[in-house]
Image (cartoon, rainbow, N blue to C red):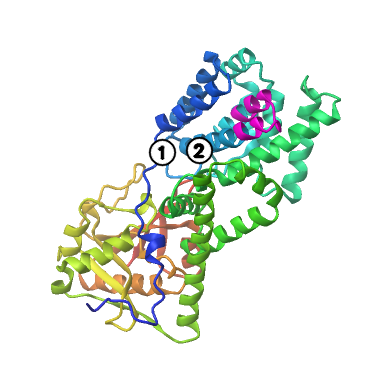
Amino acid sequence: MGWAPRSTFYATDPNILKAPMQELFSTNDLREKILNILHEEGFDSSCYSKILDYTIDLFHQKGLGIDYYGYHNIIHELEVTYVTLVASQWQNQQGLISKDDIKYLFASALFHDYDPQKRVDKPHEPDAVNFVKTDKTLGILFKEANIDTNVVAALILRTTYPWNGEKKENAELLIDNFYSMADITRENTAVIDHFKKLGWFLSVSDRIGGYALGNFSYALEMAKKNAHSLAWHPNLIAMRSVAYFEDLLNSESEMCNQILGSLPRAMRKSFMENVLGFMKLRETEIQNQASVIYDKVHLVPIIDPMKTREKDEFVEALFEIYQELPSPLQFNRTGFAESVRNPGVLLNTLRYGDEHGPIVGFVKGRSLENYKLRTGIDDPQFGKGDTIFLEPIALKMGFWGLGGGREMRLMFLMQAQSKGYKYLSSFALRDVINERMRRNERIEFVKQFDPERWDYYRVKL
């Protein structure tokens, strides 16, 4: 086949990316796992299940349920709570923490990311603390469970990330203030020190979280969601993920090793395999970058003829790349094969080496009227038949940031012009659109979206 890998083509290890993604844990699954641990530890009062269910309801009411595009949704919150409880249960059996400690870790983990304002996906811990301190329903439930909201507030603030500089200094001032107000810690240095260590325990459990519960496909999907919701360019995913884990394993080594040692072997194995997966992916990126920049290997966009587009192996090659996109960017998933074979759809692919090389990316799109766009978009050109919609650019992991996406986009613009379209519309990161504006491209915002800053734009052809 024309797109079979060559010896100079640094394909990502298929065992890393082609392994089927484990199904996301359902809210009910995680709820039951958490309640089982609480029951095993003797927390049988109904107030604990009420606190858990109240948390789940709050996240869903704020649109932060399982369908939320970002990383910090209800699943993340429950995964962190579950991992924290699993580790704390073992710590309790070793006599390192008490039953009351488990109770506080449970409450703090559940609300550590709850941000009612949601200005950006990354949680704002003071907002979570303010909610915990002022919500009347939660206050009643905490009182029934004999949980001091001041201690919960202090533990939540310790999950501030990164834990350095001004952020750390501001959080520490607030933490000291809350411990001075709590009955169980007031003027008791030894107890305060113990709870500060529990805060560190919670913070590192938060960072290990879901990475200990799934395979690399699941971990990569988490990283993509995080990147999309924080408006990172895709070429930063592997780089920042490696830096994240290296910081965790080195700067936080004492607590990280303590928590990993408290988890079942399967969880430890998943976590370390995921860390290695991101490192291998980053290595692939560097190899690809070296081949393009130093060995002058070309990334070549081409317009594939319909006889090629109709082949099953061609469709399968494109769909494999398509599946690497973050879920919110996967347009028309059910009709993907049909769209590739549709002559009314404009499409070009990116080849590695020359026009007969392996496919490492593609773009496609058609008339705007064929798409149901995101709620909130009122495009005045819709219905006029003069605008083509460009679906999100798809590139293999390891090839972002090498200029291939731009080459495909420019070729797609020429394709659209040749078909008589007057405008092109699509989605892109706000910073990318602003940069293209600075280059005097004829591009404008049609609709901006926060907190993800993934905006809808129009280009005049």
SS type, badge 1: loop
Identity of the residue drawn at 45% across and 32% down: 30
Q: Is residue 140 magenta?
A: no
Report, in whole angstroms, how far the alpha carbon at label 1 lies from the one at label 2. 8 Å
Q: Is residue 156 above or below residue 8?
A: above
Q: Is residue 100 magenta?
A: yes
Q: Which residue is mark 2?
A: 79
**x and y percentages locating residue 336 in the rendered image:** 22, 57
- Circle nearer the N terminus (1, 2): 1
Amino acid marked by disc 1: Phe
Amino acid marked by disc 2: Glu
Q: Is residue 385 visible?
A: yes
Of 113 and 273, nearer the camera is 273
Of 56 and 86, nearer the camera is 86
Find residue 343 and name its label: none
**x and y percentages locating residue 107 in the rendered image:** 60, 27
Of 448 and 204, nearer the camera is 204
**How many numbered discs sit on the rendered protein?**
2
Q: Is residue 344 above or below residue 208?
A: below
In the image: residue 452, left or right of residue 298: right
Mark 2 packing: few (<14 Cα in 10 Å), some, or many (20+)?
many
Which quarter of the image is occupied by the N terminus?
Answer: bottom left
- What residue range appears in magenta? 89-106
**x and y percentages locating residue 432 in the rendered image:** 48, 62
SS type, badge 2: helix
Q: Which residue is mark 1?
A: 25
User: In the displayed image of the protein, which residue is found farthest to the bottom?
Assistant: 295
Mark 1 packing: few (<14 Cα in 10 Å), some, or many (20+)?
some
Of 99 and 313, nearer the camera is 99
Q: Is residue 274 above or below residue 159?
A: below
**x and y percentages locating residue 222 in the rendered image:** 46, 49
Image marks 1 and 2: residues in contact by CB distance under 8 Å: yes
